[in-house]
Amino acid sequence: MGILKYAAKYLAVAIVPLLLTTKAVCDEFVVFTQLETPYKLSRQQIKQVFLGARLEKNGEILQPIVLAPGHPWRTVFNIRVMGLTESRLQSYWAQVKFTGKRKPPLQVDDFAQMLQIIDNQKGTIGVASIESIQLDKYQIIYQFSD
């Protein structure tokens, strides 16, 4: 019986921390724009736009906005949608800027600044957690999970 208690205690000590660090519910994130411009984009289209490709929807050229490096939403977006780490994206932009063929997304310091730009400029798109945007004010054009 002593060995069973030891094994149970060992398993509890080993497994409980893993359970505590695993999320029970995935965080949901979205790429969004103004409500007046309803459309959807595929993951590939989102990736291309955020890599500087020119894409037009509803007569507007899409202009992506990103938060500063290190922001948790940007990190999740880079990994889950772009399929690249921040360092790989920085390397990509260093090479592309040199050729002058594409422009990087507009970078903002905080979410409030992103919302202000999206509210005032048609064709702008941003990334946020779904809980952070007002669904009656913005159009979700792509949704993904962490």
Image (tube, rainbow, N blue to C red):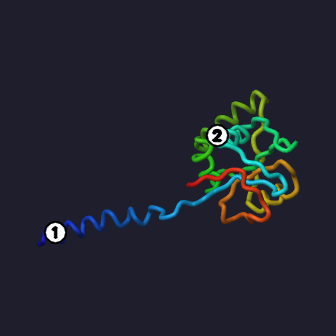
Left or right of 44 in this view: 58: right
Left or right of 108 in this view: 24: left
Residue 103 position by quadrant: top right
What amino acid is labelled 2 in the image? Answer: Leu
Q: Name the residue at 29% across, 68% down.
A: 12
Q: Of label 2 and label 1, which has the lower sequence position?
A: 1
> Looking at this view, is 128 or 105 the one in front?
128
> Looking at this view, is 99 or 55 the one in front?
55
Image quadrant holding the N terminus, namely: bottom left
Looking at the image, do the residues carrying marks 2 and 1 touch, with CB atoms under 8 Å apart? no
Q: Name the residue at 80% across, 43% down.
A: 62
Q: Which residue is mark 2?
A: 89
Other-residue count near label 2 (Cα within 10 Å), few / some / many at <14 / 14–19 / ≥20: some
Q: Nearer the viewer, mark 2 or mark 1?
A: 1
Indicate the position of residue 20 as horizontal and vertical percent values: 42, 66
Q: Using the image, tell me which numbered label, if any, was put on residue 4.
A: 1
